[in-house]
Amino acid sequence: MANVFVSHRGSDAVPAEHLAEEIRAAGHRVWLDNWEINVGDQIVAAMNAGLEGATYLVVCYSAQGMAAWMNIEWQSALARQLNGHNVKILPVKLTGDDVPAILAGTKYADVKKDWNRGVDELLKAIR
């Protein structure tokens, strides 16, 4: 069972939650902001705790691009990766067509084109 942090834009909360439910149904622990951050919680502290325990960061990018929070999340995962921590960034095309430049050279799961196939590919990458 892996620890998976799902990063997404607020406007993509519904499909991101659906994706998180699929990952959880496959037996993995999932950190999703809507599930983990409650009224009164310190947002940055909660995000940091989720990121520190994650072995995978699922970056859901969309037609609206990447939100500022998402940039902080993937940069944190990349820094941890470069410092020898066991964390892998897994891009997922949720909507839209343009891959963020930082992820252009990384294979991504395409749930926009084919939800089931994209989810299967993502789950195959999560060990």
Image: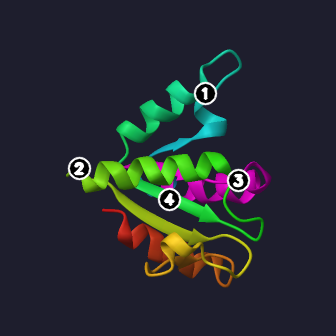
Q: Is 69 situated left or right of 122 in this image?
A: right
**Magenta segment includes 14:** yes
Q: Which mark is residue 83?
A: 2
The prevailing secondary structure element of the residues shown in magenta is helix
As helix, strand or loop, the secondary structure at mark 2 comes to: loop
Crowd class of label 1 (few under 14; some 14 to 19; many from 20; radius 10 Å): few
Amino acid type shown at disc 4: Val
Q: Position of residue 57 (x, y in %)?
A: 45, 55
**Extreme residue in the top direction:** 40
In front here: 111 or 78?
A: 78
Q: Which mark is residue 43?
A: 1
Disc 3 + disc 1, Cβ < 8 Å: no
Residue at point 38% right, 55% down?
78
Amino acid type shown at disc 3: Arg
As helix, strand or loop, the secondary structure at mark 3 comes to: loop
Crowd class of label 2 (few under 14; some 14 to 19; many from 20; radius 10 Å): few
Which stretch did the figure color magenta? 1-24
Establish if 88 lies above or below 110.
above
**Residue that carries the numbered disc 3 in the rendered image:** 9
In front here: 9 or 66?
A: 66
Q: Which quarter of the picture shows residue 125?
A: bottom left
Q: Is residue 92 visible?
A: yes
Q: Which quarter of the picture shows residue 60?
A: bottom right
Mark 3 / mark 4, whichever is N-terminal: 3
Residue at point 62% right, 35% down?
35
Residue at point 69% right, 78% down?
112
Disc 2 + disc 3, Cβ < 8 Å: no
Q: Position of residue 4 (x, y in %)?
A: 43, 50
Amino acid type shown at disc 1: Ile
